[in-house]
Image: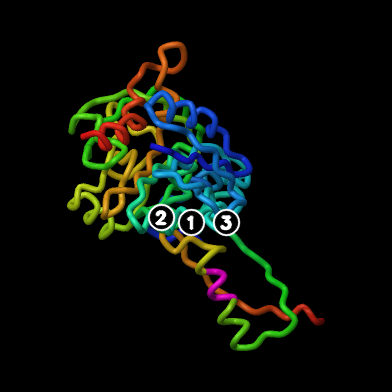
């Protein structure tokens, strides 16, 4: 599959995400925030970083980038979209995902190898995992506290929209230990930890992140 | 302003710093943002537009409340 990776001004992990996309068996296509063009891709990754310097709110300005009009439109049409860290924040600001991400409750930037449980393997990004599978991938954020009002929280829990949950420690004060969520349709996934940093033995804390990028292929040929 | 039910870590940090400077008696601090928008004239249409700006860009209604107030800069 052709997977587009958007570069915003201030994106940090776009090249890592492109590499992870290739290691996952897909073709990586660089997309530019200023181009209202998805170049015919089958899926989109919004990578981590500090787009627009996190000014105003994380992801608040990126949401209005020309490429995001196309991403929102495609996502509403069912295209798989994965937002990692800052990408997750952008998806929440775009109202493609429920809730919001706020400053970590302990007010410090956190960087650790984080254990997660995959709660929902029915998305195009998580089908390579078993439901309930425990994986360890890198987490690094300053504003990763997932919040939503009580009604929204009850709904996403009830509908199985929680994709991944923190195990061992809650690193940022996220409600219900939520690390990642999906939309009602299940094609848009946002995740605070970084699977693209756990795809090769040489770097990172293992290969547990690769499933997010190989799931698309397995789904295509399933 | 962050909604009352939303944790405000920055406000907490400020709250924690006050007693260290000898200021006591503050039971809570919440920190928000203030935007100053200059417009040529204030009409109902302009105010409605500003409300819309506040709702779509300046605030995130999932976690924040906002109020629009008019101040005269002429004087």
Pointer 1: what residue? A70
Report the side of A3 relative to A164 (left or right).
Answer: right
Report if the CB atoms under discs 3 and 1 are less than 8 Å apart. yes
Q: Helix or strand or loop: what does disc 1 sit on?
A: helix
Quarter of the image for residue A74 reads bottom left
Within 10 Å of disc 2 (Cα), the crowding (few <14, some 14-19, many 20+) is some
Give the percent coordinates (x, y) of residue A215.
29, 33
Residue at label 3?
A66
Q: Is residue B52 magenta?
A: yes
Q: Quadrant of residue B17?
A: top right
When asked about the image quadrant of residue A43, the answer is: top left
Q: Which residues are magenta?
A: B50-54
Residue A199 visible somewhere in the drawing? yes
Q: Report the residue at 39% width, 44% height from top.
A: A42
- Pick the front one: A155 or A26: A26
Q: Nearer the viewer, residue A158 or B74?
A: A158
Q: Are marks 2 and 1 in contact (CB under 8 Å)?
A: yes
Q: Is residue A162 left or right of residue A140?
A: left
Q: CA distance from mark 3 to mark 1?
A: 7 Å
Do the residues at discs 3 and 1 belong to one chain? yes
Chain containing mark 1: A
Residue corresponding to mark 2: A74
């Amino acid at each position: 599959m052709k997977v587009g990776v958007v570069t915003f001004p201030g994106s940090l992990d776009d090249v890592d995400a492109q590499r992870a996309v290739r290691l996952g068996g897909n073709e990586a296509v660089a997309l530019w925030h200023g181009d209202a063009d998805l170049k015919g891709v089958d899926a989109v990754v919004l990578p981590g970083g500090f787009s627009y310097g996190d000014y105003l709110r994380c992801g608040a300005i990126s949401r209005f980038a020309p490429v995001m009009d196309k991403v929102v439109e495609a996502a509403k049409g069912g295209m798989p979209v994965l937002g990692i860290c800052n990408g997750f924040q952008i998806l929440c600001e775009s109202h493609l995902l429920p809730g919001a991400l706020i400053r970590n409750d302990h007010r410090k930037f956190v960087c650790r190898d984080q254990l997660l449980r995959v709660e929902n393997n029915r998305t195009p990004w998580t089908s390579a995992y078993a439901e309930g599978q425990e994986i360890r991938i890198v987490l690094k954020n300053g504003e990763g506290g997932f919040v939503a009002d009580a009604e929204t929280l009850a709904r996403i829990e009830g509908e199985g929209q929680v994709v991944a949950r923190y195990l061992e420690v809650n690193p940022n004060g996220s409600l219900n230990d939520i690390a990642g969520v999906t939309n009602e349709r299940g094609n848009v996934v946002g995740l605070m930890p970084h699977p693209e940093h756990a795809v090769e033995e040489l770097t990172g804390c293992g290969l547990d992140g690769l499933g997010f990028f190989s799931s698309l292929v397995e789904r295509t040929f399933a | 302003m962050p909604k009352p039910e939303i944790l405000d870590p920055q406000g907490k940090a400020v709250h924690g710093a006050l007693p260290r400077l000898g200021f006591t008696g503050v039971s809570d601090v919440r920190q928000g943002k203030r935007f100053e928008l200059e417009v040529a004239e204030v009409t109902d249409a302009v105010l409605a537009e500003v409300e819309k700006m506040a709702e779509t860009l300046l605030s995130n209604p999932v976690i924040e409340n906002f109020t629009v107030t008019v101040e005269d800069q002429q004087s």
